[in-house]
Image (cartoon, grey):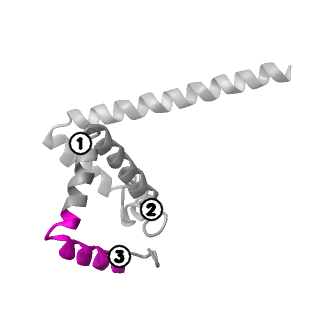
Amino acid sequence: MAKAKKSKAKKSKAKKSKAKKTKARSRRAASASRGPARKAKAKKSKARKPKRAAAKASKPKTKAKKAAPKKKQPMAGEGDYQASRSFLKDQGDFVKRHSSEIPGMGKAAEAALEGPQGDQLRAAEDEARGHSKAAGE
């Protein structure tokens, strides 16, 4: 018998919630269809409500805005995983696109180091090494 009573209670609760929803829908539809004259009448009738309603009206009405989902901030500094992933992806893409040209690029770089620009290139390499965090390389 207890189970039957529970199911009846659930059914009546569902009916009540459904009735509330339909009531709210009809109120919204009615307020949307009101003309300017009806809105003015509605405002006047609100002023004549009892003190309890006046106390509620005195509180500032603020609608709770739904906060947009926060984007995850990428980790910065050592262990910046997003930057590491994008670098590895870009590096792999470069190798795929230029796989036939890479040996020629290496030979051109070697020739430039042995040529008249070699001193400038070595100086630039030393300066860049000084900016790196790894010591001794």
Determine the residue positioned at 29% across, 73% down: 125
Q: Amino acid at mark 2?
A: Asp
Q: Secondary structure at mark 3?
A: helix
Q: Percent position (x, y) of residue 18?
A: 51, 27
Between discs 2 and 1, the one toward the N terminus: 2
Find residue 47 and report its image quarter: bottom left
**Front tag of 2 and 3:** 3
* Numbered tag placed on residue 101 in the rendering: 1
Q: Residues within 10 Å of mark 2 (few under 14, many from 20)?
A: few
- Magenta span main SS: helix
Determine the residue positioned at 57% across, 24% down: 15
Would residue 125 be counted in the magenta stretch? yes
Q: Amino acid at mark 1?
A: Glu
State if disc 1 and disc 2 touch (CB < 8 Å): no
Identify the magenta region. Answer: 112-131
Q: Quadrant of the N terminus?
A: top right
Residue at far front of view: 114
Report if residue 68 is visible in the image: no
Q: Quadrant of the C terminus?
A: bottom left
Q: Percent position (x, y) of residue 5?
A: 78, 23
Residue to which mark 2 is pinned? 80
Between discs 2 and 3, the one toward the N terminus: 2
